[in-house]
Amino acid sequence: MKASFILAVGLTWVSAAMGSRCKPSSVSSSVSSVSSPPVSSTVSSVSSVSSASSSASASATCSGNFIVDGDFSDNKLPPAWTVSGTGNAEVNPNCYAHGVSCAHLETGPTSAAISQVVTTVSGTIYDISFSYFILAASKNPTLTVLQDGVVVETIQLNVGPTHTWIQAPVVQVTATGTQTTISFSVNAVPGGEGNIQLANIGMCAYS
């Protein structure tokens, strides 16, 4: 009986040890490195607030590019882009000395915006992608993305690294008609400043 007790205890210990050794550990990881032309850089954090409610299937493919002159290679904003707001918006053909064109939006204290009317299909889901580069930011300026005048994404510029290209979170929208106006606006408060560059704007569709 004593031997049986020792054997039982031994088996219990072996079972517990093996269970502990084989139990998978929980590992959490985050990707903080973001590479975005024209400059590859490491981005520690991007603060954004999205109000878009669209959702595409994970197995669906987003294809095409419905934005005209999203790389600003025409070296001018009109006619592809419409400028609005009281701030300054222009194309910089040598974006921060990196040899790539971009849109330069600067405002203080109101807003500077560019927009484009895109041909869309009602009910279709689209992904909007872009990169931005913060030159200066004070008193909590924001970069907003709008669909037909409604804000669908807000990025807080004060919390992002400056003088670094940042790949923005993808903004997903659902078209409600055959034409959709997509806008990018830099907004500042009195005494504040928002000064950024935009590049590589794209818009693909799920089919």
Image: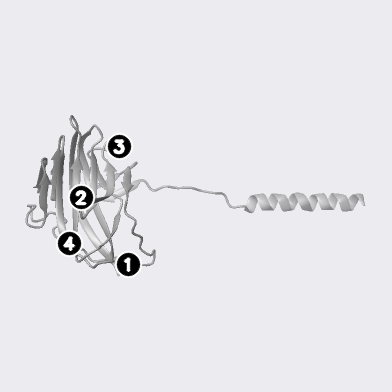
Q: How far apart, in angstroms, are the residues tagged by discs 3 and 2?
A: 22 Å
Q: How is the image coloured?
A: one colour
How far across and down, in percent of the image, does residue 29 sit?
A: 45, 47
Q: How far apart, in angstroms, are the residues tagged by discs 3 and 4?
A: 31 Å
The secondary structure type at the circle numbered 4 is strand
CB of mark 3 within 8 Å of CB of mark 4? no
Chain-order first, disc 1 or disc 2: 2
Q: In the rendered structure, find residue 61 and report the number of the disc placed on it.
A: 1
CB of mark 1 within 8 Å of CB of mark 2? no
61 above or below 99? below
- Circle 4 residue: 118
Chain-order first, disc 1 or disc 4: 1
Q: Residue at x 48, y 47 (%)?
A: 28
166 left or right of 106?
right
Between residues 135 and 7, which one lies in front from this camera angle?
Answer: 135
- Circle 3 residue: 159
Chain-order first, disc 3 or disc 2: 2
